[in-house]
Image (cartoon, helix red, strand yellow):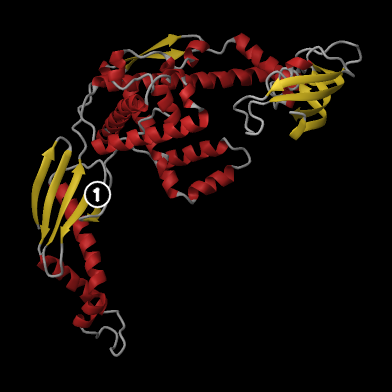
Amino acid sequence: MEVSEIKNEGLERAFKVVIPASEIEEKVMGRLTEIAKTVNLPGFRPGKAPISLLKKKYGLSLTGEILEQTVNDSSVKIMTDNALRPVAQPQIEISKFDDGHDLEFTMNLEVAPEIKPIDFKSIKLERLTAEPDEKEIEDSINRLADSNRSVEKINTDRKSKKGDVLVIDFVGSVDGTEFPGGKAEGYQLDLGSGSFIPGFEDKLIGAKAGDDVTVEVAFPKEYGAADLAGKDAVFAVKVHEIREAKPAEINDELAKKLGVDTVEALKEAIRDTYTNEFKRLSRDRLKRSLLDALNDTHDFPVPQQMLGQETDAIWEQFQKHRESDGADEDEDLKGKSDDELKEEFHRIAERRVRLGLLLSDIGRVNNIQVSLEEINNAISAQASQYPGQEQLILYHYQNKPEEREALRGPIFEDKTIDFIIEMATVKDKKVTAEELRKDPDAEPKSDDAKKKGKTSAEPAAKKAKASDKPEAKKAPPKKKAATKKTGDKA
């Protein structure tokens, strides 16, 4: 095999490889000799068919098999001999091969950058902590009591007010014609619930039992039914009853209805819920601060292929978000062209790729591993979120090994983050629940922050990608090349 390096620029490498025809022929003949021992051909006893006949019959398919194996083996040898760590599968282009002639191909790849992590002891972090507020716990219990309220018909001749439940009949029409779905009898309407189109409930406040009320409202312009969107409607409403809603009494009976024995146990359960929420938020904020610190203190080139893929993924997901959720209404996106957004998303993608490579390298150097038990625990944790469907979730992962493997990246990342935090200087700071819940991405970013990938478009990018995790997924792949012939599309 003759190998010559034809490109060495930044993280890009390219090699031209020539495999002698004699080597290919030797491997083909070796395979023919192997299959000759077992193949059956008409007119010949098993294992007695001549090689020349076998070559005529199987030579073409065997040559293709040998070519693929030779290219892959050669590529692995080149990467091993040159101590290369590719960040994606090398791209192979066969430039020349004819039967009886040398095989020539080129191998293009991007390698992992040289990364020199800082001394993690020099990192100074602030961990925000909060304790459940007793008022918040009481408010939660009051909301539970309200959600378990009872409604009773009132016998006095009073007008309806917000919070009452009306029993009504109604018929809706547009331009004097009734429309489908605009009619009901004995409907229980919770005044103030916002369950009807805007304005409908407000115009029934002040009504009495027995009243006939004409409600004139307009359907929202973005209403789901196109034939009604933006149109004026008239509803003829008959009020039959006014029912008064009364929150459930906060006592042990309510607690038992909610799954615990006493009010004190209910309070403790709510307190535990808030405590766990605050721990998660504290961890998330600490992790975000660490990622910012790592991003600010490390600067190395990122592979363009990975950067392009991440940028495209963010943009594609953002487009879906924009179409489904109306991202153009996001305050931080107003007035920005697609080109400006793409530029910001490109910076965010660069941050994510750099952090992914950094965490991957830190984990590799420090031999951080993800055990099968940890993956199984992650699956069990997911299954517990779907009461009654646990076995279905477990069965899903048992039959989807690629999805089981996908859980490894986030676990690896969290373990690497914990490894760094253990060595960093972390100072606790007590804050209010409101401060802890505040989204750091909602704050305006300085020009310096934007240069480092923290841009005003980041909240939208987070919605598009669901997370700002670099996912530590950028470890070098298994050394198998992707092959294409000259003229094929990349």
Asked whether, in this view, residue 66 is left or right of residue 442, the answer is left
Q: Residue at x 62, y 38 (%)?
A: 387
Q: Please, which residue is most extreme toward the bottom here?
A: 43
Residue 117, given in percent of the width and then of the height, sits at 23, 26
- Mark 1 packing: few (<14 Cα in 10 Å), some, or many (20+)? some
Whether residue 382 is situated above or below residue 150 in the rendered picture: below
Q: Is residue 86 left or right of residue 423?
A: left
Regarding residue 423, the answer to whether it shows in the image is yes
**Which residue is label 1 attached to?**
479
Q: Nearer the viewer, residue 179 or 264?
A: 179
Q: Where's residue 244, x and y in %?
A: 82, 16
- Residue 346 place in picture, x, y as percent: 31, 28
Picture quadrant of residue 447: top left
Q: Nearer the viewer, residue 490 or 137?
A: 490
Question: What quarter of the picture does the N terminus occupy?
Answer: bottom left
Q: Residue at x 39, y 23 (%)?
A: 458
Total marks placed? 1
Residue 367 at least partly seen: no
- Residue at the image point whose x is 72% and y is 25% from the top: 233
Q: Is 27 situated above or below 192?
A: below
In the structure shown, which secondary structural element does the residue marked by tag 1 occupy?
Answer: loop
Name which residue lies at 15% across and 66% down: 98
Q: Is residue 215 above or below residue 22?
A: above
**Horizontal and vertical percent position of residue 250:** 75, 16
Closer-to-camera residue (160/441)? 160
Residue 367 appears in which quarter of the rendering?
Answer: top left
Figure check: 108 above or below 208:
below
* Amino acid on which disc 1 is placed: Lys
| 211 to the left or right of 415 | right
**Among all residues in the image, which is located at the extreme front?**
175
